């Protein structure tokens, strides 16, 4: 039993009987939520230090949660450091950088940077925590043009498991950029910003039953586009319910998602428009602050399971199995999202980091909403890709993956050694534990 009397803290501490306990412990992913004995809803770096020292004094495990999208396995007992209220963003327009506090979401960052015409390397959903996204690599909307978000981090401040707040340098700076939350509780990061006030983007929503050639046309098209084009296609079996736009209800939708930084964007997507008339078309120029409209992902907290693999190519035969195995007739609803990689993602940053498998050409992610176990279906959908699989991304995977698939052997070995050095008692429960 943890007790505040054993180590006094100068800020709010919630226990299981506190009124706000459930509100603070629950994040976006509800499949296996945290069940801590104590929650510290921190608002600054000093409170993070105190929370970590409290856990050390009580020999307790520590979990950290901002928005909670990447949660894989909830903590039982111990301490949850909830960072959602520690979310300021400070922009330096001259240096084109932003300092992001621990709990900031990409929405917070987008709103702070937009007045300066600057953009971060944010992801498809603005509600995701910017820090955890970046620590896991960060595959964003402008990835083929600029690379991973982790490639453009200038500084990281964190509290390590000895209770000391420090700037990550040397091996620690290398490890935290791509190694996830395994090395300490990050209190803030400084990221580079880019002169992208607007972009050409949105989605073409095709009825797959009417246009079964969407996948093959998109596959061939990705072989021809410049690095200024980052795109994906998602196969989504949509239910016939009022919450879904009328044009999409009850259809198996192929959603081609586009983010383009080229002046001739409409010319570039001409082969996609030649597929036929989409049931919905949201493609056009938009302010980068509104870039969440491109993927238009659900924003309601829910339970879901996910799996991801990185592949060396899109084999047409394997590609053709996706709608057969994961379509509307599948035993469990399964969204299959395929992202085009390459471009700047293949290039090592000036300051090396732990992101691996840069040679991957595409990413396949499977997402099944609900609490049911979808592992059998996910395994079946990914089986035709076995020989093409080169690794996994950290951020798009649920619980139970082998992290040796996420990193090359040398990187994995170095990361595990550093994890042991900075957290020998394995106090910190990261979403993906090294």
Image (spheres, rainbow, N blue to C red):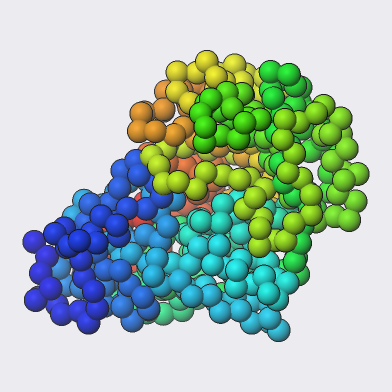
Left/right placement of residue 367 relative to residue 312 reads left
Q: Residue 29, percent across and down?
A: 39, 46
- Toward which corner of the image does residue 114 lie, by quadrant? bottom right
Given residues 247 and 30, the one toward you in this image is 247
- Toward which corner of the image does residue 99 lie, by quadrant? bottom right
What residue do we see at 64% from left, 65% from top?
120
Q: Residue 365, percent across and down?
A: 55, 37
The quarter of the picture where the N terminus appears is bottom left
Query: Does 350 sit above or below residue 426?
Result: below
Q: Residue 182, percent across and down?
A: 39, 60
Number of numbered markers: 0
Confirm whether residue 354 shows in the render: no
Q: Residue 233, percent across and down?
A: 67, 36
What residue do we see at 86% from left, 49% from top?
265
- Toward which corner of the image does residue 363 lie, by quadrant? top right
Left/right placement of residue 248 relative to residue 104 reads right
Query: Does 363 sit above or below residue 123?
Result: above
Given residues 147 and 106, the one toward you in this image is 106
Confirm whether residue 304 shows in the render: yes
Given residues 147 and 338, the one toward you in this image is 338
Left/right placement of residue 121 relative to residue 326 reads right
What residue do we see at 63% from left, 45% from top?
295
What residue do we see at 86% from left, 30% from top?
274
């Amino acid at each position: 039993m943890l007790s505040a009397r054993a180590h006094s803290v100068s800020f709010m501490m919630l226990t299981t009987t506190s009124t706000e306990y459930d509100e603070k412990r629950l994040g976006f992913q509800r499949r296996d939520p945290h069940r801590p004995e104590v929650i510290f809803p921190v608002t600054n770096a000093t409170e993070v230090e105190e929370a970590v020292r409290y856990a050390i004094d009580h020999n307790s495990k520590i979990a950290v949660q901002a928005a909670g999208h990447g949660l894989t396995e909830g903590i039982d007992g111990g301490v949850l450091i909830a960072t959602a209220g520690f979310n300021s963003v400070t922009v330096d327009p001259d240096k084109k950088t932003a300092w992001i506090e621990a709990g900031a979401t990409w929405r917070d960052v987008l709103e702070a940077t937009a007045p300066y015409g600057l953009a971060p390397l944010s992801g498809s959903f603005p509600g995701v925590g910017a820090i955890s996204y970046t620590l896991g690599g960060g595959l964003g909307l402008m990835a083929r043009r600029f690379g991973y978000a982790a490639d453009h981090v200038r500084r990281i401040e964190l509290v390590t498991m000895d209770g000391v707040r420090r700037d990550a340098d040397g091996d620690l700076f290398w490890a935290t950029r791509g190694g996830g939350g395994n090395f300490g509780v990050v209190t803030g990061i400084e990221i580079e910003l880019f002169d992208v006030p607007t972009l050409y983007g949105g989605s073409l929503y095709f009825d797959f039953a009417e246009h079964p050639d969407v996948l093959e046309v998109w596959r061939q098209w990705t072989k021809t586009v410049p690095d200024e084009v980052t795109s994906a296609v998602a196969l989504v079996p949509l239910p016939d319910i009022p919450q879904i736009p009328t044009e999409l209800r009850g259809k198996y939708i192929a959603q081609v998602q586009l983010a383009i930084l080229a002046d001739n964007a409409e010319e570039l997507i001409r082969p996609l428009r030649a597929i036929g008339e989409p049931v919905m078309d949201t493609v056009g120029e938009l302010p980068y602050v509104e870039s969440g409209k491109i993927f238009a992902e659900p924003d309601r907290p829910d339970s879901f399971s996910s799996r991801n693999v990185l592949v060396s190519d899109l084999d047409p035969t394997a590609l053709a199995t996706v709608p057969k195995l994961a379509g509307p007739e599948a035993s469990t609803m399964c969204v299959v999202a395929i992202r085009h990689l390459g471009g700047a993602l293949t290039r090592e940053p000036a300051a090396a980091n732990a992101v691996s498998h840069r040679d991957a050409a595409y990413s396949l992610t499977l997402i099944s909403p609900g609490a049911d176990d979808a592992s059998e279906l996910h395994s079946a959908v990914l089986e035709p890709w076995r020989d093409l699989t080169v690794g996994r991304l950290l951020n798009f995977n649920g619980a139970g993956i082998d992290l040796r698939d996420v990193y090359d052997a040398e990187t994995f070995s170095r990361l595990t050694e550093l994890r042991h050095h900075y957290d020998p008692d394995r106090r910190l429960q990261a979403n993906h534990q090294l």
